[in-house]
Image (cartoon, rainbow, N blue to C red):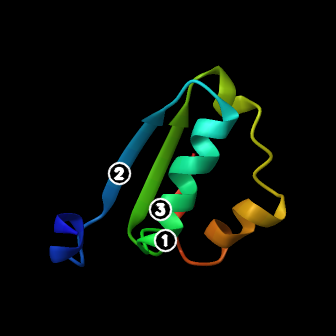
Amino acid sequence: RNLDRKEMEYKTIILDLSSRLAYKLVLEQVIDVGMNRENYHYILTGISAMDLNLHNDFFSQFLYGGVEMT
């Protein structure tokens, strides 16, 4: 919650995880705590990030809240 104290600041979070399941679990937690909105920018790295289908129903929760994913 410390990241939210500076509302106008852009928050960049780099995720370098080893599996698609790990990405899914972490990103589910991102949704649960409300970090899937404007001013958050996630950089997904690693081989498994390339395998993610960012246009399926799960990831659509990130597309319309203002969050950016690279």
The residue lying at 65 percent from left, 77 percent from top is 64
Residue under pointer 1: 32
Q: Is residue 56 above or below residue 32?
A: above
Quadrant in which residue 49 is drawn: top right
Q: Quadrant of the N terminus?
A: bottom left
Residue type at mark 2: give it.
Thr
The residue lying at 48 percent from left, 60 percent from top is 29
Residue under pointer 3: 30
Answer whether labels 1 and 2 touch (C-beta < 8 Å).
no
Residue closest to the eye, 47 or 38: 47
Residue type at mark 1: give it.
Asp
The residue lying at 47 percent from left, 50 percent from top is 42
Residue closest to the eye, 15 or 18: 18
Answer whether labels 1 and 3 touch (C-beta < 8 Å).
yes
Q: Is residue 44 above or below residue 32?
A: above
| Alpha-carbon span between mark 2 and mark 3 | 13 Å
Quadrant in which residue 14 is drawn: top left
The picture places residue 6, in percent across and down from the top left corner, at 16, 74
Disc 2 crowd, CA 10 A, few/some/many (<14, 14-19, 20+): few
Quadrant in which residue 40 is drawn: bottom left
Q: Quadrant of the C terminus?
A: top right
Picture disc at residue 21: none
Q: Is residue 69 above or below residue 60?
A: above
Residue under pointer 2: 12
Instruction: State the SS at label 2.
Output: strand
Residue type at mark 3: give it.
Val
Instruction: State the SS at label 1.
Output: helix
The picture places residue 30, in percent across and down from the top left corner, at 47, 62
Horizontal side of 23 relative to 3 (left or right) equals right
| Alpha-carbon span between mark 1 and mark 3 | 6 Å
Horizontal side of 40 relative to 44 (left or right) equals left
